[in-house]
Image (cartoon, helix red, strand yellow):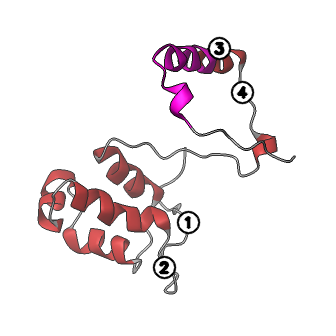
């Protein structure tokens, strides 16, 4: 469990705003919420959320998690290198079942061909 003082990736770099921070504004606006409405629903002050969105402040991971969960998202760590990704047998079986369903619905045939990765 991460402590309250641990922070998300640096959102305070003034040259670029970290995607996790800028996405807060995109999600809030897509939901049609003003900062005041978002404050009323989450309890996070509007000035604080605005500062996160602009990259003026770095949200603690707990706040970032609360914000994203409000929109139905969960923050998940994903390995950077494809070679480091390991799938369980259950996951592979589930993916095959999904692919079979899509194929039976003729959805797979409409997808573009994937380029093989040159590992």
Q: Position of residue 48 (x, y in %)?
A: 28, 71
Please identify, in this view, whether the residue under mark 4 or under mark 1 is nearer the observer. 4
- The residue carrying mark 3 is 93
Q: Does residue 45 sit above or below 87 in this rendering?
A: below
| Distance in Å between CA atoms under marks 4 and 3 | 10 Å
State whether residue 99 is above or below residue 74: above
Q: Quadrant of residue 57?
A: bottom left
Number of other residues with Cα within 10 Å of mark 2, as a class: few under 14, some 14 to 19, many 20 or more: some
> Residue 87 got which mark?
4
The mark nearer the N terminus, 4 or 1, is 1
* Mark 2 residue element: loop
Q: Which of pointers 3 and 1 indicates the residue nearer the eye?
A: 3
Q: Please tell me which residue lies in front, 18 or 1.
A: 18
Q: State the SS at label 4.
A: loop
Residue 9's label in the rendered image is 1
Query: What type of secondary structure mainly makes up the magenta span?
Result: helix
- Residue at 48% from the left image edge and 79% from the top image edge: 12
Q: Residues within 10 Å of mark 1 (few under 14, many from 20)?
A: some
Q: Can you identify the residue that label 2 sits on?
A: 12
Magenta region includes residue 103: yes
Q: Which residues are magenta?
A: 95-111
Residue 18, horizontal then vertical, whole percent: 50, 70
> Who's the residue at 55% across and 65% down the image?
9
For the N terminus, give its image quadrant: top right
Residue 95 pos. (x, y %): 60, 21
């Amino acid at each position: 469990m991460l402590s309250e003082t641990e922070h998300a990736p640096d959102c305070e770099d003034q040259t670029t705003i970290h995607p996790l921070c800028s996405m807060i504004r995109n999600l809030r606006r897509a939901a049609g919420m003003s900062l005041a409405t978002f404050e009323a629903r989450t309890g996070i002050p509007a000035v604080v959320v605005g500062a996160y969105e602009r990259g003026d402040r770095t949200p603690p991971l707990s706040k970032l998690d609360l914000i994203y969960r409000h929109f139905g998202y969960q923050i998940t760590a994903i390995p950077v290198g494809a070679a480091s990704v390991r799938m369980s047998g259950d996951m592979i079986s589930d993916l095959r079942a999904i692919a079979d369903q899509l194929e039976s619905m003729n959805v797979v045939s409409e997808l573009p061909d994937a380029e093989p990765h040159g590992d």
